[in-house]
Image: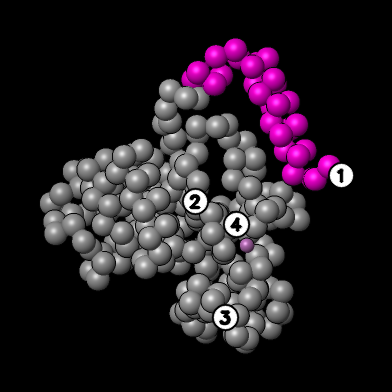
Amino acid sequence: MTESYQKIFENNKNWIAEKLGQDKDFFKKLAAGQNPEYLYIGCSDSRATAEELMGMKPGEVFVHRNIANVVNTLDMSSTAVIQYAVQYLKVKHIIVCGHYGCGGVKAAMTPEDFGLMNPWLRTIRDVYRTHQEELDLIENEEQRYKRLIELNVQEQCINVIKMACVQERYILDQYPIVHGWVFDLATGKIIDLNIDFEHILKDIQKVYDLTNSKWIMSRKDNKNLLE
Ligand code: CO
């Protein structure tokens, strides 16, 4: 009996042929190194792919995915990915992309013991608590669920901005910029939540500044960032 996974090797063969058909040096170039401009932090959900939904080719986007696109300071995986992307790959944009219909966010809205998942979901429950006033005013549960997905993206963007490597490189290069998006499974559209990166950075500076430098926000004015 043929196992379904064997189809993958067949697909792989076809993919190689397709790529070589377009460019005979495709794999030579691929093996030479990566220089992605984007770091994408998204959900592990099988429907919310990174490269495909963004129309990106191999080498163009550095990817980290976990349940409900969480960036937690105690999670070595996401923090190492961000550190590497910022410090070594020097990505220009960090995208946190959630998606409507996210099972992780749904679970965090459910009063239930999820075992080992509890500490992970706690981060999202904390997002709910932080925005409880706004969320509890939304009577329609589906709308409240959608809003929590958006607010979770926003809070995870803030968690990225709290990191020293992000702040330090922003002072030097005025990059990376952090973006919050939501992927709408029902339409295929990417919705930009228009996270005001500079504003958030300025807002949290008093508490989360890790750069030990007196710096001011001035990307738009193109001024020196150090006072
Ligand atoms: Co999800």
Q: Name the residue: 30% across, 67% down.
A: 204
Where does label 2 land, which residue? 64
Residue 168, how many percent across, how many down? 23, 50
Cα–Cα gap, marks 2 and 1: 35 Å
State the residue position of label 1.
1
Single out the mark in the foreground, 3 or 1.
1
Residue 101, quarter of the rendered image = bottom right
> Would residue 136 be found to the left or right of residue 30 on screen?
right
Can the viewer see residue 177? yes
Question: Foreground residue, 146 or 70?
Answer: 70
Callout 1–callout 4 Cβ contact below 8 Å: no
Amino acid bearing label 4: Ser
The range drawn in magenta is 1-29
Q: Mark 3 belongs to which amino acid?
A: Gly
- Separation (CA) of disc 2 from disc 3: 24 Å
Between marks 3 and 4 in the image, the one whose residue lies nearer the viewer: 3
Which comes sooner in the sequence, label 4 or label 2?
A: 4
Q: Secondary structure at mark 4?
A: loop
Apparent side of residue 208 relative to residue 43 in the rendered image (left or right): left
**Crowd band around label 1 with a 10 angstrom C-alpha radius: few (<14), some (14–19), many (20+):** few
- Residue wearing tag 3: 115
Q: Few, some or many C-alpha atoms within 10 Å of disc 4 (few <14, some 14-19, many ≥20)? A: some
Indicate the amino acid at tag 2: His
Q: Is residue 86 above or below residue 106?
A: above
| Name of the residue lying farthest toward the right | 1
Q: Does the magenta run of residues contain 4?
A: yes
